[in-house]
């Protein structure tokens, strides 16, 4: 009986940790990567080369700091290259598709 009570208590504590422990919350790195994506989208939609360059520098820095995956770095770099080449509409479409493929948990 004591073993069963202990098991029930351990299960309750584990459940409380999962529910109240913040599972499913985005990390600070994920939040910053999303903000960077949004900043890049703003630079593209406003066709602002200066802001576009700032975003590219941040994309590269976040990759160097290992907080942006190589795959996402490449995708965002390709989108940057489109915008840099004056293909603003294509870059904007690419960013919306990128955001849809990388949903931000609420």
Image (cartoon, helix red, strand yellow):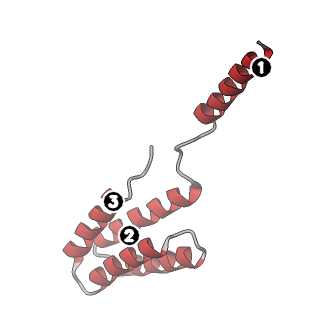
Provide the secondary structure element on which disc 1 rests.
helix
Q: Residue at x 51, y 70 (%)?
A: 68
- Say which quarter of the image contains residue 17: top right
Between disc 3 and disc 2, the foreground one is 3
Provide the secondary structure element on which disc 2 rests.
helix
* Residue 35 image offset from top left, x and y in percent: 46, 61
* Residue 57 image offset from top left, x and y in percent: 49, 80
Task: Pick the residue in front: 73 or 18.
Answer: 18
* Residue 7 image offset from top left, x and y in percent: 71, 23
Whichever of labels 1 and 3 marks the residue nearer the N terminus, that label is: 1
In the rendered image, the residue lying farthest to the bottom is 85
In the picture, measured across the screen, residue 57 lies left or right of residue 75, that is: right
Q: Residue at x 79, y 15 (%)?
A: 2
> Quadrant location of the N terminus?
top right
Tell me the residue that label 3 is attached to: 101
Is the residue marked by circle 3 packed among few (<14), some (14-19), or many (20+) residues within 10 Å? few
Tell me the residue that label 2 is attached to: 40
Whichever of labels 1 and 2 marks the residue nearer the N terminus, that label is: 1
Tell me the residue that label 1 is attached to: 3
Q: Residue at x 66, y 26 (%)?
A: 11
- Give the alpha-carbon distance from disc 1 to disc 2, as whole Å: 56 Å
In the picture, measured across the screen, residue 14 lies left or right of residue 39, that is: right
- Say which quarter of the image contains residue 52: bottom left
In the picture, measured across the screen, residue 17 lies left or right of residue 86, that is: right
Between disc 1 and disc 2, the foreground one is 1
Whichever of labels 3 and 2 marks the residue nearer the N terminus, that label is: 2
* Residue 64 image offset from top left, x and y in percent: 57, 79
Is the residue marked by circle 1 packed among few (<14), some (14-19), or many (20+) residues within 10 Å? few
Provide the secondary structure element on which disc 3 rests.
helix
């Amino acid at each position: 009986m004591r073993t069963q009570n202990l098991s029930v208590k351990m299960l309750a504590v584990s459940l409380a940790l999962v529910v109240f422990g913040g599972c499913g919350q985005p990390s600070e790195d994920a939040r910053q990567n999303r903000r960077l994506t949004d900043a890049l989208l703003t630079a593209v939609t406003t066709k602002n080369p200066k802001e576009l360059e700032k975003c590219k520098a941040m994309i590269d820095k976040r990759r160097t700091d290992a907080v942006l995956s190589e795959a996402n770095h490449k995708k965002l770099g390709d989108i940057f290259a489109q915008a840099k080449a004056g293909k603003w509409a294509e870059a904007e479409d690419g960013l919306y598709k990128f955001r849809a493929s990388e949903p931000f948990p609420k």
